[in-house]
Image (cartoon, coloured by chain):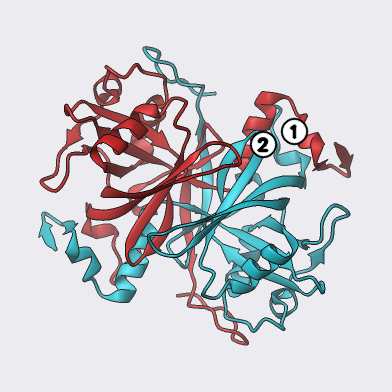
Chain colours: A red, B cyan
Amino acid sequence: MKQVLDIMHWEGKQIEKLEKEFRRNLINSLSGHKSCNLVGTANTDGDNNLAIFNSVMHIGANPPLLGFVMRPTTVPRHTYNNIKATQYFTINSVQKEIMAKAHQTSANYPAFLSEYEEVGFTPQYSSLHTAPYVKESVIKIGLELTEELPVKSNGTIIIIGRVIEIIMPASIVSTDGFINLTKEHIVSGIGLDGYCEPKLLQRFQYARPSTEVTAK
Amino acid sequence: MKQVLDIMHWEGKQIEKLEKEFRRNLINSLSGHKSCNLVGTANTDGDNNLAIFNSVMHIGANPPLLGFVMRPTTVPRHTYNNIKATQYFTINSVQKEIMAKAHQTSANYPAFLSEYEEVGFTPQYSSLHTAPYVKESVIKIGLELTEELPVKSNGTIIIIGRVIEIIMPASIVSTDGFINLTKEHIVSGIGLDGYCEPKLLQRFQYARPSTEVTAK
């Protein structure tokens, strides 16, 4: 590692030789600010499961698709097994006031315990599917599994689902469909354990060549 | 769409019947706060290209992998073609002071124009690979393509790369590897055009069952 004028500079193999915990925190922080969501699932007996994920991402608007990254062989295995068994899952927002409880769902609870009960969240059910929502979350999204993409490079799996239900307060939805997440104090994440509250600075108009970008 | 007590509630086909622009803004905002990054590439002649992406995500720390979602058939095609041709790309952070210029890279510039020149960013080169960094970005990450995952559900592609170089100020890296992105005003995104500045609220200890979550 070269350090010149307070610049850190790692190359190739140096990155892989970093101390394990340091490297994990560093690489997890590199991508920038992350989404924070609770993923709710149930098994075929209706036993429910809840886990925090900071990898939920937009895949497409038409059809409406979201995805997230999971390690099927580590903690969130219950989530994976439940999605495979029932095809359904929910994505629920994390606001500032529930972020500590949301983080606690990352603890390694045995499969027979429900994180809803252990941590203190309320399951909320839909008439459309069997996966539980989090009543305390401001935004509740119901999804049906459409595909899973195995990542060969490290054995993780990207789960992709089609949005089949959306429940949220009208007060955060703009007339053009934009959702102002900051009005309800929805948090973002850094790395494995950092939680942030974003403040909306600006919306910009659709950008065009040779035209200066303008605020919306 | 049912609206009860100011709750918006869309089910199944109702979502697909939403007005196109409204649905695009809505679904793009659903996943929560997003990362904002500039992806730098060059073709085999060395002509460079720069485009903003809000889908860069952590895939794994060992090996160090990041990914992002792209539509190869729309605007960022130059990015895709360059990555396929050279195997290299860079991911560069977007701070508050450069966010308007970063947004402007999303304009549909023809392939023969460089967004670096058109928008006013400075390419910075590495001895390890051919993809240009953004000199104005605080965090600069060099990556080598490891795989691309076609998403059958909508024809997008998830590009995954191995981190081969990291350049950033020492002042934002904690002793345990955590990067405090907020110290350098790195922005997050909402939807297609919203830019936020996150404020770090809290880091939490590793969560364990039956132990109350505590601040770090």
Left or right placement of residue A147 versus residue B170 in this view: left
Q: Position of residue B82 (x, y in %)?
A: 70, 68
Within 10 Å of the Cα at label 2, are there few (<14), some (14-19), or many (20+) other Cα atoms?
A: some
Residue at image mark 1: A16
Q: How many residues crowd mark 1 within 10 Å: few (<14), some (14–19), many (20+)?
A: some
Q: Name the amino acid, label 1.
A: Glu
Residue A203: image location, x then y, percent: 46, 68
Q: Quadrant of the N terminus of chain A?
A: top right
Q: Is residue A151 left or right of residue B178?
A: left
Depth check: give the residue in front, A148 or A121: A148
Q: Which mark is residue B63?
A: 2
Q: Chain of mark 2?
A: B
The x and y percentages for residue B149 are: 52, 54
Q: Residue B173 occupies which quadrant of the picture?
A: top right
Farthest residue in the bottom direction?
A210
Left or right of B121, for residue A142: left
Dots 1, 2 in contact, CB < 8 A? yes
Q: Residue lying farthest top?
A: B210
Q: Element under label 1?
A: helix
Q: Is residue A216 above or below residue B200?
A: below
Q: Which quadrant of the figure contains the C terminus of chain A? A: bottom left
* Amino acid found under the numbered disc labelled 2: Pro
- Same chain under badges 1 and 2? The reply is no
**Depth check: A58 or A181 in front?**
A58
Q: What subunit carries mark 1? A: A
Counting from the top left corner in percent of width and height, residue B2 is at 11, 60
Whether residue B46 is visible: yes
- Distance, label 1 to label 2, CA atoms, is 7 Å
Q: Is residue A128 above or below residue A174?
A: above
